[in-house]
Structures are given as structure tokens and as C-alpha cells.
């Protein structure tokens, strides 16, 4: 068994697993024994998505974390998502298969620098995208996700001045959609920033019937080409409801697993990044594996913790987001 220091250094339990073990059966058994629930983001490996009790986007996952009656939440996602679950359900044990599953967008907004930025705009309200640290949420008035950012901004009076962070791309998209002037923090996601406009155009030429769909964390030049823009859940629903047979998908490639399961007769082509890879994986999301998930649920470690003073401050803006989302039927 690992010591806590070792765990903090590595981020995960490093135990040899019997190769003959049926990990799916073992995880299901442990889940029942411990009254645990597995919540997984669409960007996780297909194996993890297949064993999860709930798969969703950031909004769906926080709604599920707020209402689950399980004693243990095993969060197959990244650190800020598990933190959000802990803030919403502080009495529950929240486990993350790899503590080092971080997020470049969250890292692009250090809380101390954001506090200084905020001081420059004392009459502004602060809306933060959920992809940020618990400390940043504690400094915010309302949290949002890519599913509800437009509605959250529109829920405020038109003359209300707003700071939006940390994602400048989502912020610019929301500003355009709502016709409001938002003060943006200059952060971005490493996965959504590297889609190649040229390679996508080539792909569109080769697949003239394909619809191009994109996540609002992408840059404006990419969003301009899109037939539809939406959160991961929005993109999935669009591919289910639209009769088209081919889609070029500009977001992390993990979502394609659910698209293919829901519409086996349709073709999904990952939009290529500006490197030699064919698709775009988030290295943080992909730190979680089925093996780490098994060891995590078996050992009740690594556990995510958030200081109580931060929990108390961060609860309000997240609950406000959930209330506004419910009003809009999201
Ligand atoms: P959504 O889950 O809101 O679609 O956001 C995608 C993302 O980048 C999560 O890290
Ligand atoms: Fe963060 Fe981007 Fe990875 Fe989402 S896809 S976890 S925003 S780095």
C-alpha cells in the first residue's frame, strides 16, 4: 500500500493487479459493497464510460453529484470536477483515480492573479467557467458551464458589468451570442486551442456531406466554420437528432464513443489538431485508466479534499448556477 507522500507524488495507487482479474466485475462488486457511484465525463476512455453509472458533461455531472445518495463518489474526470462534487456534497467521500488529472484551462488562471485582476473592476460581477480551482469559484458570484453560460449571462440585468473567466474563447462566444461586453480573463484550453483550420477545411472538402460541429472552447476562427456549436452534451444530442450521416467533431475525441453508440449508422470524424495526430485527446482526462479506477475504489484513495472555508464560499456560486439552469430547464 502506498504512503500518502508517494500518492501525492505519483497521483495514483501503484499496486500490481492480478492480470486474470475481471476488472469490470470487480469494480461493479466494490461499487455495491461501498455504496459508491461512478460519475464519468465524456472525455474519459471508452472502458471507463462503459462502467460508469452516469456519463455527462460538466453541468450534468455537477447536477448528479448534488443529488446522489451514494456514500462515495468516484469521479472519472479531472480535478476541478471532483472538487466541484466535493463542494456540493462535502459529507461524501470523493475519489479521483489520478490526483494529477488537472486542466490547462484551470491552470491558466492562478487565484492570486485573478484576485488582483478582479480588484481592477470593483463594480463588476464575476462569472467563472466551472473549469477552474475551488479557490477561484470561492471568489465568484456565479459559476457556469458550456451548457448554460449564455443563459447565466442573460439572467443578469443588461446593464450589469461582468468579468468572465478563465476561458477567453467561451467568453468571446458568449459575448457574441448575448451582445454583451464581457471583461475576459486570458485563459484557454490546450485541447480546444489547437484545432487546425486548414486541416479541417481539407477534411470538409473530402466529406462534403459532413456537418461540422464544435465546442465553444474552440477559437473563433474554428467556431465560424461550425454548423452547430455546443457543450459535449449539446453536440451529442445534435448528432442524435440531426438526420445527417456524417459529422466532423471539434472537441476531445472521447465523446465519439457515445456518438457511435447512440447512432451506429452514422460516421464521426474527429477534427484534426495542428500537429501530426489525427484526433485530439486531453492528456489530463486520459490520466485516468480502468486500472487506476479499480485501485482507487478498492483502496478508497486518492481522495479529493477542499478546505471548509473554501467549500462554504464556493457553494453559493455553484448552487446559483444550478438554480438558474433549473429555471431554464437545463
Ligand atoms: P463540457 O463538459 O461543459 O462540455 O466542457 C468540456 C470540457 O472541456 C470539460 O473539461
Ligand atoms: Fe481542461 Fe481542456 Fe482537458 Fe477540458 S479538455 S480538462 S478544459 S485541458
Image: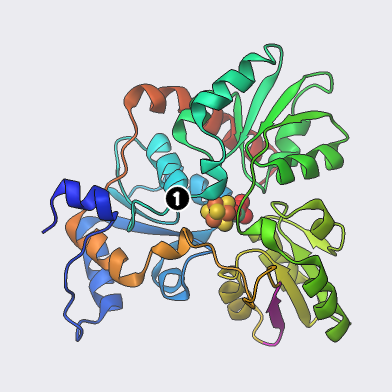
Residue 90 is drawn in which quadrant? top left
> At x 41% / y 54%, what residue is drawn?
101
> In the shown orientation, is residue 181 left or right of residue 94?
right
Residue 281 percent location from the top left of the image: 55, 67
Vertical position of residue 307 compared to residue 268: above or below = above
> At x 56% / y 40%, what residue is drawn?
108
Helix, strand, or loop for circle 1?
loop
Residue 219 percent location from the top left of the image: 76, 53
> In the shown orientation, is residue 122 left or right of residue 65?
right
Identify residue for label 1: 102
Name the foreground residue: 246 vs 31.
Answer: 246
Residue 23 percent location from the top left of the image: 27, 77
> At x 42% / y 75%, what residue is drawn?
47
Vertical position of residue 321 compared to residue 54: above or below = above
Residue sticking out furthest to the top: 122
Residue 248 percent location from the top left of the image: 75, 74
- Asked if the stretch drawn in magenta spans residue 189, the answer is no
Q: Disc 1 beta carbon < 8 A from ligand 2?
A: yes
The reply to whether residue 57 is in sight is no
Residue range highlighted in magenta: 265-271
The reply to whether residue 49 is in sight is yes
Q: Residues within 10 Å of mark 1 (few under 14, many from 20)?
A: many
> In the shown orientation, is residue 3 left or right of residue 312?
left
Vertical position of residue 146 compared to residue 31: above or below = above
> At x 85% / y 42%, what residue is drawn?
177
Amino acid at each position: 500500500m502506498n504512503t500518502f507522500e508517494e500518492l501525492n507524488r505519483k497521483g495514483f495507487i501503484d499496486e500490481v493487479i492480478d492480470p486474470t482479474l475481471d476488472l469490470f466485475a470487480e469494480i461493479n462488486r466494490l461499487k455495491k459493497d461501498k455504496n459508491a457511484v461512478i460519475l464519468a465525463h465524456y472525455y474519459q476512455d471508452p472502458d471507463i464510460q462503459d462502467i460508469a453509472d452516469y456519463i455527462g458533461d460538466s453541468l450534468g455531472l455537477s447536477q448528479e453529484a448534488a443529488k446522489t445518495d451514494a456514500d462515495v463518489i468516484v469521479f472519472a474526470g479531472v480535478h476541478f470536477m471532483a472538487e466541484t462534487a466535493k463542494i456540493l456534497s462535502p459529507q461524501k467521500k470523493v475519489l479521483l483515480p489520478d490526483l494529477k488529472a488537472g486542466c490547462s484551462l484551470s491552470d491558466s488562471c492562478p487565484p492570486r492573479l485573478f484576485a488582483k485582476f478582479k480588484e481592477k473592476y470593483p463594480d463588476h460581477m464575476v462569472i467563472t467557467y466551472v473549469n477552474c480551482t475551488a479557490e477561484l469559484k470561492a471568489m465568484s458570484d456565479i459559476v457556469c458551464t458550456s451548457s448554460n453560460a449564455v443563459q447565466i449571462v442573460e439572467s443578469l440585468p443588461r446593464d450589469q458589468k461582468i468579468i468572465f473567466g478563465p476561458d477567453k474563447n467561451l467568453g468571446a462566444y458568449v459575448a457574441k451570442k448575448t451582445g454583451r461586453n464581457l471583461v475576459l480573463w486570458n485563459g484557454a484550453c490546450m485541447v480546444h486551442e489547437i484545432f487546425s483550420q486548414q486541416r479541417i477545411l481539407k477534411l470538409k472538402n473530402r466529406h462534403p456531406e459532413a456537418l461540422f460541429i464544435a465546442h465553444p472552447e474552440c477559437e473563433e476562427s474554428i467556431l465560424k466554420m461550425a454548423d452547430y456549436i455546443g457543450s459535449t452534451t449539446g453536440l451529442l444530442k445534435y448528432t442524435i437528432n440531426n438526420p445527417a450521416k456524417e459529422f466532423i467533431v471539434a472537441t476531445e475525441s472521447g465523446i465519439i464513443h457515445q456518438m457511435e453508440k447512440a447512432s451506429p449508422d452514422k460516421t464521426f470524424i474527429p477534427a484534426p489538431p495542428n500537429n501530426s495526430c489525427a484526433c485530439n485527446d486531453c492528456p489530463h482526462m486520459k490520466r485516468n485508466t480502468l486500472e487506476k479506477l479499480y485501485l482507487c475504489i478498492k483502496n478508497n484513495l486518492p481522495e479529493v479534499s477542499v478546505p471548509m472555508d473554501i467549500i462554504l464560499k464556493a457553494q453559493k456560486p455553484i448552487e446559483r448556477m444550478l438554480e438558474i439552469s433549473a429555471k431554464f430547464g437545463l
